[in-house]
Image (spheres, rainbow, N blue to C red):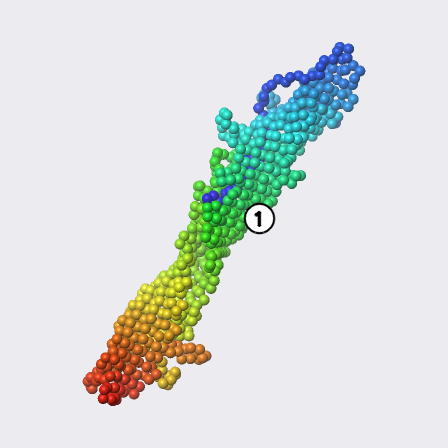
Amino acid sequence: MKRSEAAQYARWSAIAALVLALITGGYYMRRQWVAFKEKKQAPPPLTEDKERQSIGLTLSKGEGARTVFTLQASKSTDFKGQDISLLEDVKVTVFGKTGERHDIIHTQSCRYSKADGAIQCAGNVQIDLQSAADFARAGNDGMGKGNIIHVETSSVTFERGTGRAQTVQPVHFTFSNGEGDGVGAVYFSEDGALRLVKDVRIKVRPTSSSEGGSAKPGVPSVKEVLLTGTSLDLGKLSRKAVLSGPATATTHAQELTAGEFTMLLDPQFHAQTLIAQPGSRGETPKLVSTAANGPETLTANEIRAELAPEGWVRTVDADGNVRGNTPNRDMIADHATVEMWPKVNESKLATLRGSVMLQERDPKDASFRRLTTSALQLTMSATSSKQKSTIEHAETLDRGAMEWTDAAGAVSKLSANKLLADFSAAGKAQHLTALGNVETQRDLKGRPTQTATAENGEALLDDTGGWSQLSLHGKVRLREGERSAESQQAVFVHANQTAVLTGQAVARDASSETRATKITFHQDSGETVAEGKVRSTDLSSKKSGIELSPVPANISADRMVGNTKTGKALYTGQRARLWQGPSVLEADSIELLRDTRVLNAVGNVRATFPQASGESTQPKDSSKPATVWHVSSGTLTYWDQENRAHLEKNVVVQSTGQRMRGPVLDLYFTRPPGPNGSPGTSQIERAVSTGGVVVEQGDRRGTAENGVYTAADDQFVLSGGTPTLYDAEEGATTGNKLTFNLADDTIIVDSATGSRTLTKHRVQR
């Protein structure tokens, strides 16, 4: 994956945190005073006979010994015959019920109704909102300014009895790093609360300290935030500000919308918590960011940021139905928490909990990656405020599963009690570690599902996020259909579709088992290569093709190359050896063809086969060992269905007392029934040699073009060419056909003049 889908969520969280952090500037940072002169909008002067002037006026409202607010006017004019006074240079100082406030309302002139205490100010009105501590601090440091929000409006009505001031006119307010507008306002002096009634619009600019330097002249800040909402409630005593929605916070590249934004303030009136919620309108908080690859969105039932007094974000929490989306990535969780690096508003540690799912798609080849777990933690590198955090490490806090689907549709899955991923400096995942109860699964089109288990594992990842090599360690168990394998280590290489098993490697299928130092499976071709101390056991000889005996066949060699598709297995190196019951075969190479049930042995072939008993299927004397034939040749081919072996190149077959030699020889086997009536051990029933045969018995030697040995008759028959018998006592005897009867030690010679029988002393066998 080019950048982990987990790192993508961290970026979403950091953006949300930045937007929420900038909102706070409108409520607690020092404002830059702008000096200006206000035009007086006093009522037209009255005639002398209708007014009576007085100098100065002070009105107060208190609760017990505490003054809630004080109204002061430098000049008061009473109307003759009316209960109305004209107040000039009016100043209302609000202390609040607890004395924690020092808000100031100032205007040039107002009408004061003595009957109900209402004060109407038709001209421009200024309201400065600040705490008593900030006012005192500003006076002590001699700067003449405190932590103030400056409000400007007009046509304000102030109710002396309730201490409430309100207007329906446009309202403009400024603060240290921004300004705002609205229509209509209500100020509650007893509670120190201000409400902007509708059409709220706030612009927040980052300070030079938060940017690490002043912005260039004429270049707008990339982090400037525009806030809009239906209404704004600022509670000085409750230390809470609520921007009701639909509420929107917008920068040049991001937009955060919600039903409402809520800010909680500390006793020093610094923002400490910012919350985006659905509010009464039920609008789910949603962050949309503009990126090169398309829009990125993050939604949750609630997004909450905890802030430091200096304004940077400490933590961000997204709770309930957390969803993150880009054109190629998706994220799902029940809850997410992001801890930030101090002062730079960049992610440090992100934790996702509850049904976590991260998914990334590759638009080029439609491959994708998916991570699922119940808890995931991401660690990000420390950066400056001008750099994005990049993920360094990720790990599941509970069992997790990683799934890859490649362009060909093959699905690979790795799960474990814990998954850990390490990333490069560029934020690309490079290495994935799986710890405890590792399970893998791979689905290839047209093949059975491949599964594996192990104690631990690891995966190497390529630049696209796909796995290039997967390694399993400790008690590895593999299965694919009827095939299974075991080893201490297994390495899967994606590029060449291989699985390499080492450490007491064992491979099994429905009919055989192979053990070796190393076993390699080529999954695309179906080829299996076993190397080092190879030993195969044919567990079901009928399925593997060769049945020399009803007991399992065993083959040993230095190397074996088999193929499940072709049914071929070739054993080579340092005298490949096959043994099954009393039959034994050795050669430089032994090849088994399962489908045709053929065995091919090549190079220095040596074999031992039992001979069928003469005159019956059972030996006459059961205590007498069965006759065994020893075979040597250059090549040997055995057809199990035909019960026939074909030998070539310097063929020699012999038993005790007799031997047959020739360039080509065929052995024909019989399978007498076993104890339970099933076919028993294959035994030599007949041997046929062509192309020049030599038969030897004791001191006799017969030669001919062809030779046939029959076990049932226990005799050799020589024919073709000029059959000749060489005997030390009788000399050479020729005929058209020579027959050696080994049982009674006679030789029958057929010639043109008839046949005759030669009897010699019996040769001990």
Describe the element under mark 1 as helix, strand or loop: strand
Q: Is 75 on the left or on the right of 726, as rendered?
A: right
Looking at the image, which is closer to me, 81 or 502?
A: 81
Q: Residue at x 71, y 22 (%)?
A: 70
Residue that extends furthest to the front in the rendered view of this protein: 752
Give how far across and how far down residue 228 sits, in percent.
61, 32
Q: Is 251 on the left or on the right of 260, as rendered?
A: left
Looking at the image, which is closer to me, 258 or 134?
A: 258
Q: Is 382 on the left or on the right of 39, as rendered?
A: left
The quarter of the image holding the C terminus is bottom left
Looking at the image, which is closer to me, 89 or 523?
A: 523
Give how far across and how far down residue 537 sits, in percent.
40, 68
Query: Which residue is tagged 1?
Result: 354
Q: Please indicate, yes or no, whether residue 46 appears anywhere in the rendered image.
A: yes
Residue that extends furthest to the right in the rendered view of this protein: 81
Q: Residue at x 23, y 87 (%)?
A: 752
Q: Determine whether 118 is above or below 733 in the image.
A: above
Q: Residues within 10 Å of mark 1 (few under 14, many from 20)?
A: some
Q: Determine whether 353 is above or below 274 in the image.
A: below
Q: Residue at x 38, y 63 (%)?
A: 562
